[in-house]
Amino acid sequence: MIGMKTGLLGGTFDPIHVGHIHIAEAAMKEYGLQEIWFMPAGDPYFKEGMGVTPPELRLEMVKRCTDELPDGFSCSDIEINDKNRTYTSDTLKKLNAMYPEREFYFILGLDSLISISTWHCPAEIFKRAVILCASRDSGDDFSKAHEIIRDTVSVFYEVRPDIRLIHTPEMNISSTMIRKLISEGGDASPYLTRGTYEFIRENGLYGSHR
């Protein structure tokens, strides 16, 4: 399909949770995306030494999750299958070459956008995708987001990045919170799809028990 609008939502996904899904759904609705690929990171260099769950297990959690979502949401193993250290700029370069007919939209959070100048080859990211930044749907947060976007544009003025905001509700959910809840014997099912939650319990992840 010429010009198919494809969203990319990357992350460690340790585990993937409803917050990730809400952001993806908001991006799809607000910008008319035809599909969204969840891309679990293979070797998240920014989390070295932090005891990240093995990639094949994180990939399966994402697959279990997307199997329960409507058509248009799927799991990409492009970074998991890359045995080298993976960078967003390199992944986008590969995807542009593999799918020249697609228009890619890279979805991230405001905190990530704030630090994107420290990423590997950030200008390459701006060249190869429209950036969709998830920001809480409130005046103060949107003002901050606009300020960050303005500053980011000034840093990468030669590239003229296309950065747009996604209106998302406030959600106090994180993978860290979910791992802690499970390790303490709590019920994390409200924050996970059924398939993801069952997989976690089946494999004893995060100290869970059947």
Image: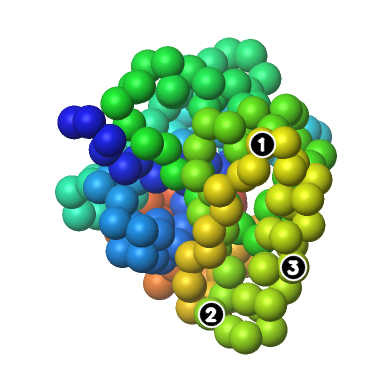
Of badges 3 and 2, the one in the foreground is 3
Quarter of the figure with the N terminus: top left
The numbered mark, 1 or 2, whose residue comes first in the sequence reads 2
The residue lying toward the viewer, choosing from 21 and 188, is: 21
Disc 1, SS:
loop
Could you tell me residue 56's position as x and y percent? 47, 28
Disc 3, SS:
helix
Disc 1 marks which residue?
A: 159
Measure the C-alpha gap from mark 3 to mark 1. 18 Å
The numbered mark, 3 or 2, whose residue comes first in the sequence reads 2
Q: Which mark is residue 137?
A: 2
Label 1 environment density (alpha carbons within 10 Å; few <14, some 14–19, many ≥20): some
Could you tell me residue 160's position as x and y percent? 64, 43
Q: Residue 6 carries which label?
A: none
Measure the C-alpha gap from mark 3 to mark 2. 15 Å
Disc 3 marks which residue?
A: 147
Three-letter residue code for mark 2 = Asp
Residue at the image point whose x is 72% and y is 36% from the top: 158
